[in-house]
Amino acid sequence: MPKSARIDALLARLAAVPQAPDLFNPFQDPRLAGNMRQFLLFLARQPVKLALVGEAAGHRGCALTGMPFTSPETLATNANPFFASHRETMFRQGDVFEPSGRYVWGVADAHGVVPLLWNALPLHPHLPGKPRTNRTPRTKELELGKPFLAEVLDIFSPRQVVAVGRKAEHSLGALFPGLAFRTVRHPAMGGSTLFRAQMAEILA
């Protein structure tokens, strides 16, 4: 099956995952799913050097754009080859920025890489009734994300896989016991300096 068909099937399965009072599914919005589709189709046309796997969608990033570590500010201002060529066709709401996204794309752009971005839980976990918050994903939610993570890694076969934070490390380790991957500090909560140093070492 062509990569484009596999990507469409993946996003359709994601869109079918039910929401909950404390779990938002951005892929049920065709505009947000469309952003991610454009990104994945762009990556499908070239070898993928790097995959960054985060913990879960955040309220300032993926919950607003459909793309991990990517805020509306990133869509509007980032000048790498993907955003520069797709800015006019992507859906953007507001100008909110996500600190972690700034660090992730800052490192990627500094090294001339457009990485595959995914989350161990591709949905947005939040406090009940408070969609503009983040909460730590539960074990059963990370289990829900495993087949999607497995599929996206199988589609793209990235040369290097990096877990961003311990939750992503756990999901990758449990799903792929033989997979060689690196783990870096999540840039949130004071981790940005170590994150940048670790990523610079990986991409050197």
Image: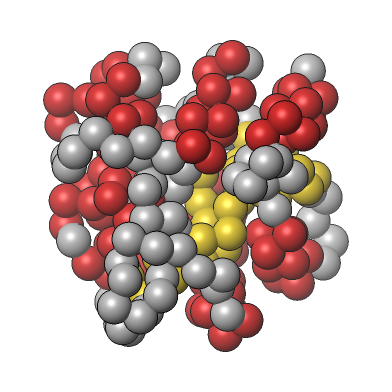
Q: Quadrant of residue 72?
A: top left
Asked if one can make out residue 159 in the rendered structure from this viewpoint, the answer is no
Left or right of residue 154: residue 67: left
Is residue 56 shown left or right of residue 9? Answer: right
Q: Nearer the viewer, residue 67 or 192?
A: 192
In this picture, is 16 found above or below 30? below
Q: Is residue 38 above or below residue 81?
A: below
Residue at position x 75%, y 72% in the image = 174
Picture coordinates of residue 64, whole percent (x, y): 28, 50
Q: Nearer the viewer, residue 196 or 99?
A: 99
**In this view of the protein, which residue sits in the foreground, 23 or 120?**
23
Residue lying at 22% horizontally and 67% vertically, measured from the top left: 28
The answer to whether 86 is drawn above or below residue 147 in the figure is: above
Residue closest to the eye, 15 or 167: 167
**Relative image position of residue 27 (x, y in whole percent):** 28, 62
Residue 15 visible in rendering: yes
Q: Quadrant of the N terminus?
A: bottom left
